[in-house]
Every structure is written in structure tokens, then in C-alpha cells.
Amino acid sequence: MRQKSLMLLIVMGIFALLPSEAMCADAAVGDVAPSFMASTLDGKNFDLSALKGKVVVLNFWATWCTACQYELPSLEAVWRKYRSQGLEVLAVSVDSPHGRKHVNEVMRFFSFPAAVMHEITKNDLVTLETVPLTYIIGKDGKVENILRPPSSPLTESGLGDEVKALLEAKPEPKIDDGSGVKTETKKDEKK
């Protein structure tokens, strides 16, 4: 019994010494997107885990961010073009609670759903250090791309092409390897 207690203390000590990023890292490309739930500005619920089978774009922005202001019209154009085909969008403002009035003013010009970060009910997806930041999540629930300007700015053509490809992607076939466990195969679609 004493050995088990000692072992437990050692394990707890190791975890205490690990950097916090190792224990709570942001989702990366290829990861299954973790929980993200919010109440939208119009009072609806947004639950990322309930959107499997759809392509999801999560855009983090702020009213004071010039680059963000350039991205919002592109996001609107892609939303209007592909929402009937299974695209879901949520623009999450990181403005302070006092800035909600400004967020509402900006969002009057756009039709896609929006939320404010301080009203997010569950966020295991990202720890924001800068905006704009956009996560693109495929129908399988995996993070397909993360756009971080200036190296990867969100543009109508770039985002539109990526969303279209993800919406048109066929589900990967399940292969029975004889063990009773079905596995997925990836095919190179760039041939």
C-alpha cells in the first residue's frame, strides 16, 4: 500500500512539473477537434461535437483588429455560397464584455452566426494568443487547417476552394482487416 501511495505521489509530481501547454495543448491539424460550445449572439446553441458530418469554420476575431475586418466579408461570401451544402460557420469575437455593443454593430452586416469569447460555455479547442485565427474542421470532425495571418490569411477564394473540397470529399472506406476492427484508409487525392 505504501508503494502505491509513493508511486501516486511521483506521478503527480511529474505532471506538476510539465508545462501547462503539454497538458492543455491547442488542437492541431489532424487532431479530432475537441469540445467547443457557445451561445450565439441570437441566443442559439453552437456545439461543435454535434456537427460531425458537416464542414465547420471557426473564426476568431475582434472589432479592433484590422486584419479581422478584411476577413469577415470573405467569410460571409463563403458562408452564403456553401451553407446549403453543409457548411457551418461561427465567428467568435474576443472583444471584452464591454465591447459586445460593437460586436453587435459589426455583425449587423453579416448573416453567419457569431458569439463572444467571454460567453463560451466550453473551450477545449484553443487558447488564443492572437487574432485573426481560423480553424477549418472536416466532416469527420478533424482539424483540416488552421489559418494564421499573415502567413495564411483567410481569403474568399482560398477558403472557398478548401471548403468546397471538404464538402465534396467522400467518406473514407472502412476496411475489415479480419480482426473484427474496421480501419480507415487514406487515399492521395492529389494525383
Image (tube, helix red, strand yellow):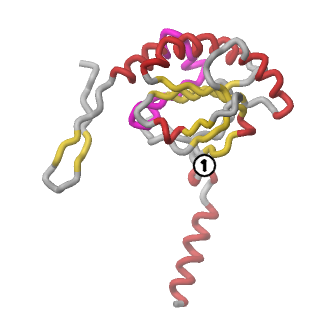
Magenta residue check for 148: yes
Q: Magenta stretch: residue 158 in it?
A: yes
Picture coordinates of residue 168, whole percent (x, y): 34, 20
Residue 128, image x, y percentages:
67, 36
Which residue lies most toward the bottom here? 1
**Viewer-nearest residue: 168 or 130:** 168
Q: Residue at x 45, y 41 (%)?
A: 31
Residue shown at 68% from the left, 40% from the top:
120
Q: Is residue 42 above or below residue 174?
A: above
Looking at the image, which residue is at 55% across and 77% down? 8
Name the secondary structure under disc 1. helix
Residue pictured at 56% horizontal, 52% vertical: 22
Q: Which residues are magenta?
A: 137-159
The amino acid pointed to by label 1 is: Glu
Residue 27 in percent (x, y) is at 52, 40
Is residue 10 visible in the rendered structure shown here? yes
Extreme-right residue of the structure = 98
Where is residue 161? Give x, y as percent: 43, 14
Position of the C terminus by quadrant = top left
Q: Is residue 190 left or right of residue 180?
A: right
Let me know if residue 133 appears in the view.
Answer: no
The residue that mark 1 highlights is: 21
Q: Is residue 162 left or right of residue 66?
A: left
Res 174 quadrant in image: top left
Instruction: Please state which of residues 106 and 46 is positioned toward the viewer in this rendering.
Output: 46
Give the image quarter of residue 68: top right
